[in-house]
Image (tube, rainbow, N blue to C red):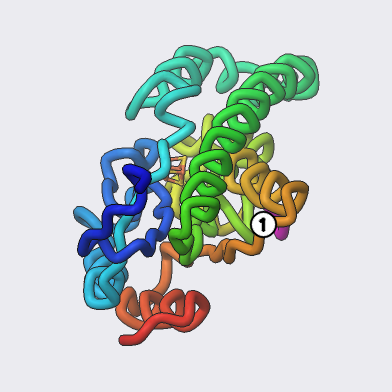
Amino acid sequence: MRFSDFTDNGGKKVVFLNNCLLNQTSRAPGVAFREGASTELIQILFNNGLNIEQLPCLECIGMGGVSRKSFDAYFPLLSNFVKNGWFPIVKPYFKLWLNNFGRLCKKEATKVVDRMEDYIREGYTVVGVVGMNDSPTCGVTKTMDIIDFTRRLVTAEETGNTPKQIIQETLIDGASFFIGNIMKELEEREMDVKVVGFEPWTESPQEEAERIATLLNLQF
Ligand code: SF4
């Protein structure tokens, strides 16, 4: 007999959730889309007897915590450059900074897929991954043009636009730094795990939760 031959009531099914579906404080300043966790979706996951793994918030890790301090530090400088029409000068440095962030996301994505592979190898079911379809880091089918977003954000005080409005205006099709790399890694390892994108700005959180449940073949 092996240790792993023991059985229990754990359910053996797990879903990987984007960090801010459970914790809105991870969202960048000004872009929390509700108060607290996404209870409508989580309730459905509970009702289906699923275990939940919370993915790390890569922006909190790679951009200086909940206030994104390493981004915030350059905010006044960026703001001056944009106002004076010099944004093209700083753009290459910004891209370099983003490349470093992309490398961190890739490394963490590999670890997440290692964990999924372990589950599957040991006979567990990975029901899916739920990402966040307004994020440059966690978007699945939609992401954000983060350079354009930043250009507009640093002048938000003058233009009167809110971060929420700027997100809507800078959304583009495509996958993101972190979840995009998870998807790539799954494909390379030929692992059949569904990855779906939650729409955070929906009018009806309940309908959105049900849409996600349908994509993951869950009951509601
Ligand atoms: S979308 Fe991703 S990076 Fe953004 S706050 Fe949520 S978990 Fe963090």
On whether residue 136 falls in the magenta region, the answer is: no
Q: What residue sits 27% from the left and 46% below the top?
A: 23
Q: Residue furthest bottom?
A: 220
Total tally of numbered discs in the picture: 1
Q: In the rendering, at what x and y percent does residue 148 appear? A: 67, 40
Does 167 sit left or right of 151 as displayed? left
Q: Which residues are magenta?
A: 171-175
Q: In the rendering, at what x and y percent does residue 27 appear? A: 36, 42
Image quarter where the C terminus lies is bottom left
Q: Is residue 65 above or below residue 114?
A: above
Ligand 1 found in image quarter: top left
On whether residue 173 falls in the magenta region, the answer is: yes
- Residue that mark 1 sits on: 191
Residue 128 seen anywhere in this rendered image of the structure: yes
Q: Is residue 34 above or below residue 102?
A: below
Secondary structure category for the residue under label 1: loop
Q: What residue sits 67% from the left and 35% below the top?
A: 147
Amino acid marked by disc 1: Met
Q: Nearer the viewer, residue 71 or 138?
A: 138
Q: Nearer the viewer, residue 32 or 174?
A: 174
Q: In the rendering, at what x and y percent does residue 80 appear? A: 59, 17
Q: In the rendering, at what x and y percent does residue 160 appear? A: 45, 45
Q: What residue sits 72% from the left and 48% below the top?
A: 189
Residue 166 seen anywhere in this rendered image of the structure: no
Q: Residue furthest front?
A: 1
Crowdedness near tag 1: few (<14), some (14–19) or many (≥20) residues, C-alpha within 10 Å: some
Name the magenta segment's main secondary structure: strand
Q: Nearer the viewer, residue 4 or 213?
A: 4
Q: Is residue 89 above or below residue 220?
A: above
Q: Nearer the viewer, residue 118 or 206?
A: 118
